[in-house]
Amino acid sequence: MYPLFKALSLLPLWLLHGLGWLLGWAVFALSGGYRQRFLSNARQAGYGFSDVIGAVGQAGCMTSELPRIWLGASPGFEWRDLPVIDGAYAAGKGVLLLTPHLGCFEVMAQALASRYSGAHGPLTVLYRPARKQALADLEARVRDRPGLVAVPTTLSGVRDMIKALRRGEAVGLLPDQVPPEGLGQWVPFFGRDAYTMTLAARLAQQTGAVTLLCWSQRLSFGRGYRLHFRELQAPLAKELTPALAQINAEMERLIRECPGQYLWSYARYKQPRAEG
């Protein structure tokens, strides 16, 4: 797996994105279950196919760009809303960064680590190890890098995130990822109950960290990525269930900024799996 990814990482980003675009359309055309979930999730959010057609190809780009992001030369970044992220780090209370399955969330972590880790410590990110062992081994090999610490979705990983926030560092996770059974609550997402992780809200409530929203937008023709940061529209609720509803609403707000780059095929409304 590593040699293949290393070879692909040498290709220009525009070519990888072009291949990914074709891959996304091929999967959409050939897999009825995938296509049905994509369209159903988009309709649940109030979108017709014409509104989200770009997301078909973008889903493939999410896969095809990984070799370059993990093993290749750093792509170009356009930083937006720098006062928002600069102010959060300067507060010294830790920064909790939340992003949905929107754009290229992998590159956001690398960009933040390269810009801020020298002065503010490493960025700790939560990830779910792949089920296929070969890919899991590759992830373990490539995700950790200077200024960036990747921790798995385990109790020890959660402890590492809490410690990082209490040291005044930053952590990042995807709160729209469906957690294992027992680690979430059913809360509306685009008007339909979705099993929602409690971790993001608990981290904020237990540590007092500054909570920010972020997402990384793919630019056309392989020109790189534009990084966006947003503050919460209101302070996070102190009670858990209202806080979860608030986080879901904030994720909806980000997705509506660019529905053509959201992963509509993600099984957001599935039943949680049993842990272990």
Image: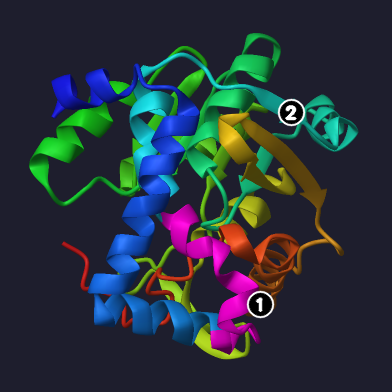
Q: State the separation of the CA atoms marked 2 and 1.
A: 31 Å
Local packing at callout 1 (Cα closer than 10 Å; few below 14, some 14-19, many 20+) is some
Q: Which image quadrant is residue 246 in? A: bottom right
View extreme (left): residue: 133
Specify the label residue 78 is tagged with: 2
Residue 17 located left or right of residue 31 = right
Q: Which image quadrant is residue 72 in? A: top left
Name the spot of residue 157 as percent of width and height, x first: 37, 41
> Which of 46 and 115 lies nearest the eye of the viewer?
46
Q: Would you say residue 272 sits in the magenta stretch?
A: no
Give the position of the C terminus as an image quadrant: bottom left
Amino acid carrying mark 1 in the image = Ala
Amino acid carrying mark 2 in the image = Glu
Name the spot of residue 253 as percent of width and height, x first: 74, 67
Residue appearing at x 42%, y 51% in the figure: 21
Q: What span is in magenta?
A: 43-59
| Vertical side of 128 occupied by 159: above or below | above
Residue 49 located left or right of residue 141 = right
> Which of 13 and 175 lies nearest the eye of the viewer?
13
Judged by depth in the image, the label closer to the viewer, 2 or 1, is 2
- The majority secondary structure of the magenta stretch comes to helix
Between discs 2 and 1, the one toward the N terminus = 2
